[in-house]
Amino acid sequence: MSNNFSATHFSQLTLPLYNDLPNFNLYMDQVIDEVNQYLQPLTGTKITKSMINSYVKQGLVDRPEKKRYARSHLAEILVVSVMKQILSLDTIKQAMTIALKLDPIDKAYNQFIEVFNTELTQIKTTNLSATDYQRMAVHALLSKSLVEQMLAQKPLDD
């Protein structure tokens, strides 16, 4: 077994900026295809119709107009799908509410994507030892806890 791990799994992965998302309305099947091309290589999972419907029902994603999803819907679905790998849907909803109070959807989404893609680039270019998973797991746990504490202290009125 090798003592080094290269994040080649992520070599072709980046998430699209807002203006790189389709600028026309999509039906559910098209949304699923569009989101899964980014989500599946990252998480190993695929989004489903019932997941999207659940996000809409819970207020994480705006309701589509006449069963058609706009660029803003894709942005919301991508953020929720990525973040739910580590945060609860309630925490994600709270974070998105705060972000969207501060900035319009395109700017808030691009800020998230730029941070995500920057971190991803750093991971892609790092050779990791076989024991780095411990440090990374602890970092993920502490970061998750810190995000939840920050959101718990952040009133939505600010």
Image (tube, rainbow, N blue to C red):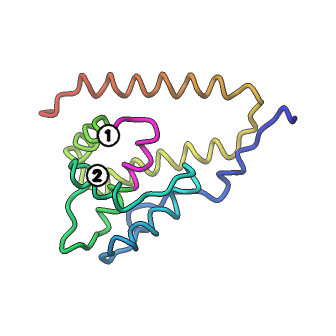
Q: Answer yes or no: do the residues labelled 1 and 2 have beta carbons within 8 Å?
A: yes
Where residue 128 sits, quadrant-wise, is top right
Q: Is residue 149 left or right of residue 62?
A: right
Question: What residue span does the magenta drawing correspond to?
Answer: 78-88
The residue wearing badge 1 is 89
Image position, residue 102 (x, y; %): 22, 44
Q: Is residue 138 above or below residue 39?
A: above
SS of the residue under disc 1? helix
SS of the residue under disc 2? helix
Q: Is residue 104 magenta?
A: no
Q: Residue at x 53, y 50 (%)?
A: 117
Question: Crowding at label 1, few (<14), some or many (≥20) Cα neighbours within 10 Å?
Answer: some
Q: Residue at x 28, y 69 (%)?
A: 69
Q: Is residue 136 above or below residue 18?
A: above
The residue wearing badge 2 is 55
- For this rendering, which residue is in front, 151 or 52? 52
Q: Please, what is the three-letter code of the amino acid marked with disc 2?
A: Tyr
Question: Crowding at label 2, few (<14), some or many (≥20) Cα neighbours within 10 Å?
Answer: many
> Looking at the image, which residue sits at the far left?
157
> Looking at the image, which residue sits at the far bottom?
24
Image position, residue 129 (x, y; %): 77, 30
Image position, residue 119 (x, y; %): 55, 42
Q: Is residue 146 above or below residue 57?
A: above
